[in-house]
């Protein structure tokens, strides 16, 4: 039995015992590994960075989908950038009001290998008739599409390699162009304790583009270094201050079973630690 050592951070990282190596391949875009670990179940890593595990993926996928969709209240069309493992798609597809789901994933091998080796992530969601799966660079897609969306979810790798462009000003600008009135952009934006510069950079870009921008967070055990932040960009500030009563009504009406998300967690997630607020230049009561 060998170990898988994450290499995201110099001199600090997590190690997984690899009980079984299920698949390893250098795709056109990145190095992909999927293996079995006794505590975390099946684990996928790309270019030395843990992407998702069967044990804790629910936290991340529930928070990046139900928060914007329930805050929006009437999302009909959703765009997922990245998300090749299918977990984000699974959670979006639970919303019966959503009529159109576009998913733009740069690496078709990730989709194929996750369908085969991580079936619990997508749970058949790739067969959802509402899905339009596009294998392409998310940046190219949002720069050129004539489609409009109520919610855009950027479920990308870290800003290294193919994922780097998904943290650029051009990307956020193009996403804003693709949002309907009242639309919401949310993105994976790293763990601020370890990647505070990434949060600051995103804040500086969102500030110029969105009437309302902020971050929210959730602790995902295998995204090491503390809570992960999710960036939030919206044209309507009211979507970030939907009341617990309204969120509860919408959540109950959705009939969605969750293991992490609930309206109190939704509201609490937008409360940020002082060091993060200072880094993004926001007062505590924003
Ligand atoms: N949960 C993970 C995280 O927080 O780091 C992300 C998981 S998901 C597997 C990340 C996906 O983003 C990968 O499948 C990768 O191929 C995709 N990706 C990276 N760069 C992309 C790009 N420019 N356009 C579309 N998809 C991209």
Image (cartoon, rainbow, N blue to C red):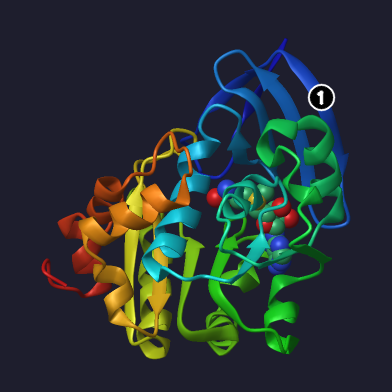
Instruction: Identify the residue at image location x=34%, y=83%.
Output: 236
Ligand 1 found in image quarter? bottom right
**Foreground: 105 or 62?**
62
Number of residue marks: 1
**Foreground: 284 or 92?**
92
How crowded pointer 1 is (Cα within 10 Å; few <14, some 14-19, many 20+) is rated as some
Q: Is residue 128 above or below residue 241?
A: above
| Relative image position of residue 181 (x, y in whole percent) | 47, 88
Which residue position is annotated with label 1?
22
Instruction: Identify the residue at image location x=29%, y=70%.
Output: 240
Drawn side of residue 117 relative to residue 180, left or right: right
Q: Quadrant of residue 229?
A: bottom left
**Foreground: 157 or 93?**
93
Residue labelled 1 has its Cβ within 8 Å of some atom of ligand 1: no
Q: Residue furthest front?
A: 253
**Foreground: 227 or 255?**
255
Q: Quadrant of residue 231?
A: bottom left
| Relative image position of residue 264 (x, y in whole percent) | 24, 47
Instruction: Identify the residue at image location x=71%, y=13%.
Output: 19
Q: Is residue 168 visible?
A: yes
Q: Is residue 29 above or below residue 73?
A: above
| Relative image position of residue 272 (x, y in whole percent) | 22, 57
Drawn side of residue 25 relative to residue 238, left or right: right
Quadrant the N terminus occupies = top right
| Relative image position of residue 284 (x, y in whole percent) | 12, 66
Quadrant the C terminus occupies = bottom left
Instruction: Identify the residue at image location x=35%, y=70%.
Output: 200
Q: Is residue 201 visible?
A: no
Helix, strand, or loop for circle 1? strand
């Amino acid at each position: 039995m060998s170990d898988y050592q994450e290499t995201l951070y110099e001199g600090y990282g997590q190690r997984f015992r690899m009980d079984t190596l299920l698949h390893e391949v250098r795709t056109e875009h990145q190095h992909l590994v999927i293996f079995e670990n006794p505590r975390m179940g099946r684990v996928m890593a790309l270019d030395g960075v843990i992407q998702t595990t069967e044990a804790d993926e629910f936290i991340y996928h529930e928070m990046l989908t139900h928060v914007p969709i329930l805050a929006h209240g009437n999302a009909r069309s959703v765009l997922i950038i990245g998300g090749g493992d299918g977990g984000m798609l699974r959670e979006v597809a639970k919303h019966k009001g959503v009529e159109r789901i576009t998913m733009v994933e740069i690496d078709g091998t990730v989709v194929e290998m996750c369908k085969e080796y991580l079936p619990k992530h997508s749970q058949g969601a790739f067969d959802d008739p509402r899905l339009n799966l596009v294998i392409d660079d998310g940046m190219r897609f949002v720069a050129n599409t004539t489609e409009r969306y109520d919610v855009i979810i950027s479920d990308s790798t870290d800003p290294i390699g193919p994922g780097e462009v998904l943290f650029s000003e051009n990307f956020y600008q193009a996403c804003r162009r693709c949002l309907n009135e009242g639309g919401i952009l949310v993105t994976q934006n790293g763990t601020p304790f370890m990647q505070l510069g990434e949060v600051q950079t995103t804040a500086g870009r969102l500030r110029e583009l969105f009437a309302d921008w902020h971050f929210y967070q959730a602790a995902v055990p295998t995204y090491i270094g503390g809570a992960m932040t999710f960036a939030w960009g919206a044209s309507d500030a009211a979507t970030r201050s939907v009341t617990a009563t309204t969120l509860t009504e919408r959540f109950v009406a959705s009939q969605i079973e969750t293991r992490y998300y609930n309206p109190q967690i939704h509201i609490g997630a937008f409360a940020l630690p002082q060091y993060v607020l200072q880094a993004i230049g926001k007062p505590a009561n924003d």
